[in-house]
Amino acid sequence: MNVLMLCNKPPFPPLEGGPMAMEATIRGLAGTGVRVHIIAVESEKYQAADVPGELRERVSMETVSLDLRVKRLPALMNLIRNRSYHLARFRSPGLQACIRRALALRDYDIVQFETPYLGHYLGLVRQESRALVVLRAHNVEHLIWERLARQERGFFRRAYLAQLSRQLRRYESAFADACDGVAAITPSDAGWFASNCKVPVHVYPYGRDLSHASDISPAQPDDRLFHLGSMNWKPNEEGIAWFLKEVWPLVRRDGRDAELHLAGRHMPDWLRHGQWAGVTVHGEVPDAMAFMEEHGIMIVPLLSGSGLRIKIIEGMEAGRAIVSTTIGAEGIALTDGEHILLADTPGAFAVRIRELMDDADLRAGLGLRARERVRQAYDNAAITAGLMGFYLKMKAGRDSHG
């Protein structure tokens, strides 16, 4: 089988959620003998690394550079014309030519769009190929902006975000319906697509390579808190701002000497130069799993977003104790109190953190059960087998109809 993946950012290096999910797909497919060709957009924020040597027999990649910086005038013009600026930024003659060449050089069984942002090129794919087209939905994209709008206090910015959400919602459902199938990253996302389009929908979560055990000890003697996530994703920045303002003072009340360590790419200036008692801002770290090993309690204070928090899956595999909002843990196969602790108000979030800080056995028990849950639900080999079955079922359905 030959698969063409059209990516809005490079899957290599896999340093944050989207690229990590793409890389897991690529490794899974290559492991089953599928040949994967990748066309990825590079930008000022995302530069590609080479395909790892162990994958080169089955995987190839080419990139196209686009200027994806937000420009006020084009953004305003798209708003006035009721068009999505998110989508307009990916329109490029160079990218179109690259896709056309790839389709001419090889017959593909599947063309997989990683997110709908490259959906402008669907017509070209239909014109140049008989491949089945799959939308790999990393999120319900419009829901991210809808939730951000709800949290926004400024009238004009709230109205602008709400308009972006409405534009994306219309496009997202129409694009999904124009594909042959949707592979959604969570059951809740799959439910939205199933209710808003007529094509087959498959739940295809992020998978981990579980062929070897995690090197991280599940023992949790450390009660230091940490957050690990790319801060150029607006929900992460919003969540940490809420946590520092509303939750952190409650955690440290009564003179408690708590520590919080923040790591991730693209730390904004207000975080890098801010001063909060007990808070250390590390910025990007060379090894995420090694950083987790140094700390005992993961926090995921998300107030908006969609899709699946890959860092929670990593934290579960590492056996860390985790406190998250309900939105943060959305779509992950876990149970509050058994694999994770959930809280949605500042007071409740602080109480759960303090409980974990005071009880090493609670930390260890949560971590051990979380690690086992990952092994049950997020084995990449089993998840890839499900995706292959989805591909083949779509192909059989088309063949039966001529």
Image: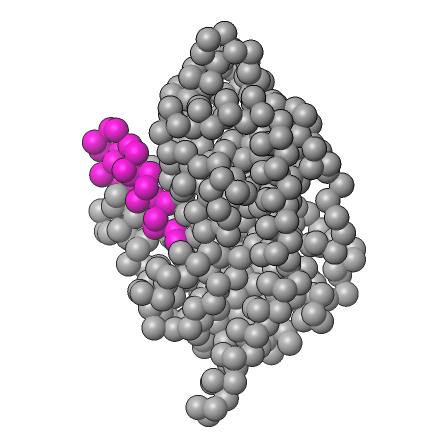
335 lies above or below 276: below
Looking at the rendering, the stretch of residues picked out in magenta corresponds to 140-161
Quadrant in the picture for residue 369: top right
Q: Position of residue 245 (x, y in %)?
A: 39, 19
Front in this rendered view, residue 163 or 223: 223
Q: Position of residue 194 (x, y in %)?
A: 36, 66
| Residue occupying image coordinates x 39% and y 28% | 348
Label the magenta part by its dominant secondary structure.
helix
Q: Is residue 116 magenta?
A: no
Q: Position of residue 378 (x, y in %)?
A: 60, 55
331 lies above or below 204: above
| Residue occupying image coordinates x 32% and y 41% | 147
390 lies above or below 221: below
Whether residue 388 is visible: yes
Quadrant in the picture for residue 265: top right
Front in this rendered view, residue 360 or 386: 360
Quadrant in the picture for residue 162: top left
